Image: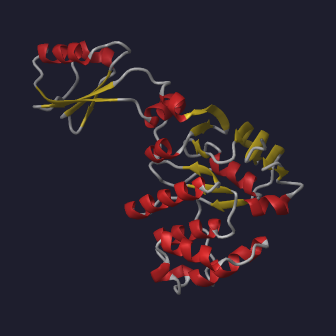
Amino acid sequence: MISALHIEHLHKSFAGTPAVRDLSLTVSPGEIFGLLGPNGAGKSTTINMISGVCRIDSGTVRVFGHDNCTERCITRRLVGVMHQEIVTDNFFTIDRALRIHAGYYGVPRDNSWRELLIDQLGLGPHLHKSMNSLSGGLKRRFMVAKAMIHKPRLLILDEPTAGVDVELRRNLWDFVREINRDGVTVLLTTHYLEEAEQMCGRIAIMNHGELIALEETSRLLARIEGRHLQVTLEHPLQEVPAELHDLQPALRESGQMLHLVLEAGQGAGAVLRRITDLGIEVGDVETLRPGLEEVFLHLTGKRPDNGQAGGK
């Protein structure tokens, strides 16, 4: 089976500083694939090379078997990209831009598809507004519609929900799932790790331009063993007693919440007895499984930036 996206030994440097180093990965047709990493990890540079915006130093990118350097007209038509940076056609209204944009790819106008995008992304009330009068959230909605207007087989979404409201975020992901069921392959970058955890079957993590993990999401989550114990205290603590330091403790909510990490096979009941034996009064307890944020921190040493743009 031909891959939707095949990247092999991809390199890119800027002024002698490597941005992407020997990157190789494959995305299968029909996947929703996550590409994660801290700011400056090389995600956007990789996307720009896939889409042809940025010249490749060395290596190859193939989209459904077509080389994006030697067959660029074909690959441009196969790929739709919503870039992280806001890019709009300031001299056009939303309506005008969406009517002409598919023609850039040699794709016939499909009014029904355009109207569906307008409806799904809530652009209807704003169709006749110029781009420079739109809010940042509306500009992002338009950029998603523009990326989809020519019906690409591979859709790349680079931080699509940064700066948009919760309702649009939910509607967008519902729509992405729908077009994915219809056969569109999706490559997603996001700092909202709960989105990646819910949406992506496989996830690649980059750091300093290099690929440091590529696994099924469930396997990636399994890298962090044990459970987390979240203890709400009756009275806030100023510091954690030394007797609990083996549980990797962290005080949160101004000392009202104690977060502990249980090793594999360690019982929550025994840990709670240790806490109460120290004279600490417990109000509530919740056990949590490790999430993608913990895996991300474990692998990169950095927390995600929660949708804040920046870096390549």
The outermost residue toward the bottom is 128
Viewer-side residue, 15 vs 180: 180
Return the x and y of residue 137 as percentages of the image width and height. 47, 68
Q: Give the number of callouts.
A: 0
Q: Residue at x 69, y 80 (%)?
A: 100
Q: Residue at x 58, y 83 (%)?
A: 95
The outermost residue toward the front is 182
Q: Say which quarter of the image contains residue 92.
A: bottom right
Picture colour scheme: secondary structure
* Quadrant where the image shows the N terminus: top right
Q: Say which quarter of the image contains residue 117.
A: bottom right
Left or right, residue 134 beside residue 272 = right
Task: Determine whether 231 is above or below 149 in the image.
Answer: above
Viewer-side residue, 15 vs 111: 111
Task: Determine whether 194 is above or below 109 in the image.
Answer: above
Q: Residue at x 10, y 31 (%)?
A: 234
Viewer-side residue, 170 vs 274: 170
Task: Determine whether 18 is above or below 83 in the image.
Answer: above
Q: Say which quarter of the image contains residue 290.
A: top left
Left or right, residue 242 beside residue 9 = left
Q: Residue at x 53, y 28 (%)?
A: 219
Return the x and y of residue 43 as percentages of the image width and height. 63, 47
Left or right, residue 230 beside residue 3 = left
Return the x and y of residue 238 as percentages of the image width and height. 18, 29
Task: Determine whether 308 is above or below 96 in the image.
Answer: above
